[in-house]
């Protein structure tokens, strides 16, 4: 028996309605905020993610599904996230000279070779958005408002917005050297990965999950204390805008994000009561990414929202029940002639937009009625030779047991 790959999941018809409901809310909200849907390939040249996500990140160093293409001498990777592909796509499709801002959203699966656990899988589903072409904190506020409004509409009252600014390339050198000093004097206590990242990218050390490193990180200098005037002013305006938009947040200096492209405002929406994988949404501003992937200088702001983590948070609140559609009518048929008649009526009513089932298994009448009950049919109709000869049959309302005579050739629901 061949089993599915560890860290992936089968989503069965009993669960897809919940996914579709959540995805529907995401689409509606994104489109209300003027975002258009973009679809990019599931795999890309590995180089895109190495340059886009960053070569010192966990995602690139430890988690990417990378393989050699069959016939060409190149390395390709399954996408571990959505932003790099969208940036490549806007450059490649000449969108960078369109009127700004550009606003895109996507609902995709991403692939990361992580340790599977609750809220962490190797193929996971993500709603993401990207906005390009505005340096104003008004753009950041708009992106955050969209994420917040999706979470509100889903009823997630157990989610809190954590906000930080990690500064731009002007504040970075000062902050970087403060970090190198802080971690450098305790270097022997760091894990090997952190040791090797200390000189290349000390910001990554703030994100390490190793308990010893996390302890040292907890007393590290805070980005907000090392912001340049411009970043400070922008962060203050973002906070004022969120206040005015009545979006609650806490300023949390521990939010630094695991991918290299972020600059300026970063944020996470964190759910209570769903265990260790509690970040349902993470995002922020990325000002250098478009340029570093070969495009013009263009500011970006985006986020990714993990759909399975949202479901965990909804289940925690007991709001994850979505109704599974039940048939309007089940037609029980006795014998071949009746089965053909049942198929004809079923097809006619389906064309009228109804959800109708009839027996196509050849069960006994008793078994057919049991099945009709099981699938929750609202009405049933039993037809045999005598009903066909008379052209009429009894339509039974399953909720109150009442029966009405209907004409087989013309009745509607
Ligand atoms: P984490 O710190 O939890 O590893 P991350 O910073 O790596 O998250 P992002 O790259 O920001 O995650 O992805 C955006 C969102 O996608 C996350 O906030 C989370 O909800 C979801 N996500 C990320 N990785 C996984 C995964 N392996 N399984 C399920 N959902 C995930
Ligand atoms: Mg991660």
Image: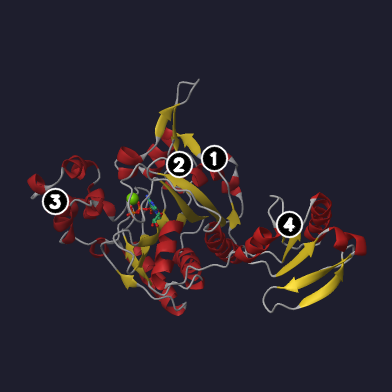
Give the alpha-carbon distance from disc 4 to disc 1, as whole Å.
41 Å
| Residue 28 makes an appearance in the image | yes
Indicate which disc residue 183 carries. 3
Report the front residue among 82 and 241: 82
**Dot 1 and dot 2 residues touching (CB under 8 Å):** yes
Give the alpha-carbon distance from disc 1 to disc 2, as whole Å.
8 Å
Q: Secondary structure at mark 2?
A: loop
| Residue 304 makes an appearance in the image | no
Q: Which residue is mark 1?
A: 41
Q: Which residue is mark 4?
A: 358
Instruction: Give how far across and how far down residue 409 sits, in percent.
Output: 90, 62
Q: Nearer the viewer, mark 3 or mark 1?
A: 1
Indicate which disc residue 148 carries. none
Report the front residue among 212 and 162: 212
Instruction: Give how far across and how far down residue 55 sits, in percent.
Output: 32, 39
| Residue drawn at point x = 19 percent, y = 39 percent | 196
Upstream in the sequence, badge 3 or badge 2?
A: 2
């Amino acid at each position: 028996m061949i089993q599915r790959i560890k860290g992936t999941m089968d989503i069965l018809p009993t669960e897809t309605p919940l996914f579709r409901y959540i995805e529907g809310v995401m689409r509606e909200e994104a489109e209300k905020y003027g975002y258009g849907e973009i679809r990019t390939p599931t795999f890309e040249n590995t180089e895109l993610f190495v340059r886009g996500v960053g070569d010192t990140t966990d995602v690139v160093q430890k988690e990417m599904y990378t393989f050699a293409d069959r016939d060409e001498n190149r390395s390709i990777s399954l996408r571990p996230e959505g932003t790099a592909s969208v940036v490549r796509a806007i450059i490649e499709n000449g969108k960078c000279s369109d009127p700004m801002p550009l606003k895109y959203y996507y609902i995709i699966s991403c692939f990361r070779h992580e340790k599977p656990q609750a809220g962490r899988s190797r193929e996971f589903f993500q709603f993401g958005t990207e906005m390009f072409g505005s340096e104003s904190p008004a753009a950041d506020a708009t992106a955050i408002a969209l994420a917040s409004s999706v979470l509100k509409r889903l009823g997630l009252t157990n989610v809190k917005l954590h906000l930080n600014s990690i500064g731009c390339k002007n504040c970075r050198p000062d902050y970087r050297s403060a970090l190198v000093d802080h971690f450098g004097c305790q270097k022997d206590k760091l894990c090997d990965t952190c040791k090797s990242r200390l000189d290349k990218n000390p910001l990554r050390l703030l994100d390490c999950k190793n308990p010893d490193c996390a302890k040292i990180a907890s007393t590290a200098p805070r980005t907000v204390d090392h912001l340049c005037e411009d970043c400070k002013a922008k962060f203050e305006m973002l906070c004022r805008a969120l206040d005015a938009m009545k979006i609650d947040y806490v300023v949390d200096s521990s939010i630094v994000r695991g991918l290299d492209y972020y600059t300026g405002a970063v944020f996470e929406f964190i759910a209570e009561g769903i265990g260790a994988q509690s970040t349902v949404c993470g995002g922020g501003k990325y000002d250098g990414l478009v340029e570093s992937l070969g495009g013009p200088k263009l500011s970006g702001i985006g986020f990714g929202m993990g759909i399975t983590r949202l479901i965990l948070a909804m289940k925690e609140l007991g709001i994850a029940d979505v109704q599974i559609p039940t048939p309007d009518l089940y037609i029980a048929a006795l014998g071949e002639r009746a089965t053909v008649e049942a198929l004809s009526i079923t097809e006619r009513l389906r064309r009228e937009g109804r959800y109708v089932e009839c027996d196509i298994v050849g069960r006994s009448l008793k078994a057919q009625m049991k099945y009709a009950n099981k699938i929750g049919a609202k009405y049933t109709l039993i037809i045999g030779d005598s009903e066909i000869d008379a052209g009429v049959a009894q339509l039974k309302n399953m909720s109150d047991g009442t029966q009405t005579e209907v004409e087989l050739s013309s009745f509607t629901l």
